[in-house]
Image (cartoon, rainbow, N blue to C red):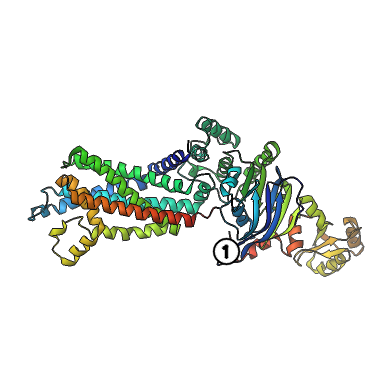
Amino acid sequence: MSALPTQIGALAQRSITRTARQPASAIPPLVFPVVLMLLNAGGLHASTKLPGFPTDSFLAFALAVPFIQGALFSTMNAGTDLARDIQTGFFSRLSLTPVRGSALLAGQLAGIVTLGVLQAIFYILAGLILGVRFASGPAGVALLLVYAALVALGFGALGSFLALRTGSGESIQGLFPALFVFLFISSMNTPRNLIAVDWFRFLATANPVSYLIECVRSLIITGWDAEALALGFGIALVLALISLAAAVWALGQRLERT
Amino acid sequence: MSEAPERDNSIVVEKLVREFRKGPRAVDGIDLYVAPGEIYGFLGPNGAGKSTTVLMLTTLLPPTAGTARVGGYDVRKEGPKVRSVIGAALQEAALDPLLTGRDHLRLQTMLQAIPRAERKPRQDELLERVGLTEAADRKVRGYSGGMKRRLDLALALVHRPSILFLDEPTTGLDPQSRTALWAEVARLARDDNVTVFLTTQYLEEADVLADRVGIIDHGTIVAEGTPAALKAEIGRPSIHVIPCNDGDRPRIKGLLDGFGEPFGDGHDLAVRLREGVGMADVIRAMDTDGLVVDDVELRAPTLDDVFLAKTGRTLEGAAESKDGAAAP
């Protein structure tokens, strides 16, 4: 039997263990997005009175945002962990084992995806406790977990690519605010059709993060919206494929072993 | 540089070169042979090319030119096969501070494809061997430098390699930890017939541990042989005098020059003794001339003397004068 699944499992387990043993990096991706959501829900509740607003619960509207914020945190964690491995020589230690390059990356990403799904479960539970009901029902919740895994894979691979290219945790952390800008110029707080400022609506419409959020939002508020799901899953898939390809290429460049 | 023995060597290197784009030739056409079960000490100052050589021999860095066979496999063309027969503890123990010692061994046994039933016994055996059984379930961030190095060695041994690369394994360790590591490395070579390629900048380490020593400077091997043979090559012992009065230095220097070649950095009152003269002759001459001294010391040649004779610098001085442009 191939050793590949064992190797991937071992590396994924390490990634999860590391995160679990670092409360300082494990808790913020869980807590901050929920706190931000609660603050927004408190301050922007009046938005639900706007004609055409899709729900009368701003909490239900805002619950989609933590999923993407959490994924951005995952990007940073995946990147900084891998960059630290490169800086400390742990990456060289792994390179000296028979483990394949693909397993090195897959193991790291398997850990990130697992953590991404656990994060999503936390947000779903937080939403349910706060009274949000999922219009798409249990099947929609299950699909949301699949979506969370796909988004975590995409952002995790992006973080790995950045780490492999720069080899520096500081560089990854420096890029984090830039990634957050995409979140703020999206439809995170207002439906795109209700954004009154033309340039902002244009940016939000051009910003793929808007569609990632709207996919989650559709499962919570609308039920089964084929267009929103297709756009969200499509963009998440393209992001994952591009990031993975970039990460595999960067791994080849970094891994000089013969 | 050295004669190829008749039997196959564990490590065979011919005209190995590594150039970096923005730096000098870190390794400049070295040849070396290491026999099975031998401990080969690769001695040189920082930046001499030791670690770059290890990276090439462990397949982590492709050579620019030349050939190297490790365990019978070509490092350039048969990387996975080379990695299957080697273990390596590279410079600075590369450990995850958040994992325990046992976590590290568990990960390593899985990545090295050790059969499931053998993993736990192998982990326990290695923890016992390096004296980390009690600390096995503590996170590595709480380990001392010596404990980290011992764990590093255990990880390198997980898959029972026949060749072990140790890159400056005792740098920064206290004398007790250093001695313990030397004992384990010597045991591996003696009892398990493991070939050990050990880089070091410590003369004592090479002297005590290595069967043979290669001295590298600026990417080339400047001397190679057993420590005893290298020191014998330098030949005669040196005599070092500390005068009672500084005013006597010129007279003492003149007297010493009559017994051999001036030695050291020019400030020392020291000569390498000529054949046929001994310490007693020097003392008698100083007594006759009425020279009073604080101390007279006869020193046998050291590997540092070998380095000095071959490069014109001491190892310590070479490390200090390193310009930092050399490769890792």
Q: Residues within 10 Å of mark 1 (few under 14, many from 20)?
A: few
Measuring from the top left, give residue B258's x and y in whole percent: 89, 66
Q: Is residue B319 visible?
A: yes
Instruction: Between residue B117 and residue B217, name the one nearer to us.
Output: B117
* Percent coordinates x, y for residue B308 in the rendering: 74, 61
- Toward the viewer: B310 or A242? A242
Location of residue B286 in the rendering, given as x and y in whole percent from the top left corner? 88, 62
Q: Label 1 amino acid?
A: Phe
At horizontal 16% and vertical 51% (from top left) the residue drawn is: A42
For image coordinates 8% across by 53% down, the residue present is: A49
Q: Is residue A69 above or below residue B317?
A: above
Q: How many marks?
A: 1
| Residue behind mark 1 | B20
Measured from the top left, where is residue B173 in percent x and y?
A: 60, 48
Q: Chain of mark 1?
A: B
Q: Label 1, secondary structure: give it.
A: loop
Relative side of A39 to B259, left or right: left
Left or right: where does residue A187 sit relative to residue B46? left
B208 or A160, which is in the foreground? A160
| Residue B1: quadrant of the picture | bottom right
